[in-house]
Amino acid sequence: MIAPPDAAPASRHPVLEVIGVTKAFHGVPALRGVDLVLEHGEVHGVVGQNGAGKSTLMKILTGVYARDAGVIRIDGQEAELDSPLAARDRGIGMVFQEFSLIPTLTVAQNVFLTREPRANRFFLDDAAAERRTSELLNDLGVTIDPRTPVERLPVGARQLVEIAKALAKEPRILILDEPTASLTTRETETLFAVIERLKARGLSLIYISHHLQDLLRISDRVTVLRDGQRVLASSVAETTLAEVIRAMLGSALETRTARNRVIDRTAQPLLEVRDLVARGHDAAISFAVWPGEVVGIAGLLGSGRSEIIRAIYGIDPPRRGEIIVRGRPVAIRTTADALHLGMALVPEDRRSQGLVLDHTVRDN
Ligand code: ADP
Ligand code: MG
């Protein structure tokens, strides 16, 4: 239902071949002769540090940028991909990292929005759109009511709608750029199940992520880019996380991993949390944060990570416990109290909790 069945038996050629693709911006090379081979029905992980050229390559594949040199073949035939429409016609679809959904429209309206001519932004046959959207979502194994306004959906569900929207264009190659960036562990699992289904149906996927463990779990093969060049291409079964990291970092590995930042823990902590019991929990937690320090809080879903932060930040005042800022016990009852004490929170769902989207950048 999702992938149009191949008219001919799967060709001997890879579904996509990128050969020696080059691209420079104002004379500065972003891609320097990159090769990439995508086989039918595989998930192909693409990794690299920021600036390695991943997005530039994907924008070339989706017809957003024109390449300076190199060849792209689809099923063994040269493809121009000189516009987004041309890329779409050749069966290349993209799930955007920054969500492209319109919050006030329903799921179905969003899924079919971009299929409509520009002059007419509204789908005339809502019922048909809803039926087709239901089919797409059912195929993905998820239950989301197509009539729900997107703004009422959690982030994970929005990501799935984003995928349904890409699938409505019936791609054969689907590119996912950092799809798990704002998902919870559980939502990521759902996404991975969806990817497995798409793969089983013969779709080929390119998966970009900084979460290397996730990427190696879901991918069949991996390509590593560094400074606009392919430095590793391997089947995941024949490589290791360490090899991938080494390829990404190159000779910078030793200096990168040697942390020579020293935290002076004899000084006064900036923040101390003593025997704090967050709302809905029983266990008390204590920890301290010193200047210049990054403290990670890890735990399974439901273990209370977010609740601790909500308690400290005055969103849900704690049941018990003490919070000490720069040596002084403080009472944080509202987020305004937390702000006055010099704390800032970047929340889990930055779209809905972090920003007031209809206010200006400055106000935010
Ligand atoms: P990645 O997605 O791997 O982080 P990018 O493809 O975004 O890397 O960037 C590769 C290089 O190309 C970087 O040096 C970046 O600064 C440059 N670059 C990307 N897009 C543009 C652009 N539109 N104009 C100028 N330079 C760009
Ligand atoms: Mg990028």
Image: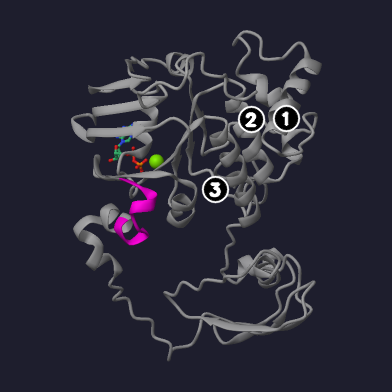
Q: Is residue 85 above or below residue 336?
A: above
CB contact under 8 Å: marks 1 and 3: no
Label 3 to label 2: alpha-carbon separation:
16 Å
For marks 1 and 2 on the same chain, the one whose residue lies earlier in the sequence: 1
Q: Amino acid at mark 3?
A: Thr
Location of residue 122 in the rendering, given as x and y in whole percent from the top left corner: 71, 14
Under tag 2, what secondary structure? helix
Is any part of residue 358 visible from this angle?
Answer: no
Under tag 1, what secondary structure? helix
Location of residue 311 in the rendering, given as x and y in whole percent from the top left corner: 70, 71
* Residue 261 is one of the magenta-drawn residues: no
Q: Residue at x 38, y 52 (%)?
A: 237
- Residue bounds of the magenta highlight: 234-243
CB contact under 8 Å: marks 1 and 2: yes
Q: Amino acid at mark 2?
A: Ala
Q: Quadrant of ligand 2?
A: top left
Q: Is residue 222 above or below residue 335?
A: above
Disc 1: which residue: 107
For marks 1 and 3 on the same chain, the one whose residue lies earlier in the sequence: 1
Task: From the viewer's perspective, tell me whether residue 10 is left or right of residue 121.
Answer: left
* Residue 236 is one of the magenta-drawn residues: yes
Disc 2: which residue: 164
Instruction: Specify the quadrant of the image occupied by residue 293.
Output: bottom left
Location of residue 201 in the rendering, given as x and y in whole percent from the top left corner: 57, 30
Is any part of residue 257 visible from this angle?
Answer: yes
Residue sitting at the far bottom:
266
Q: Which mark is residue 180?
A: 3
Task: From the viewer's perspective, tell me whether residue 19 is left or right of residue 220.
Answer: left
Q: Amino acid at mark 1?
A: Val
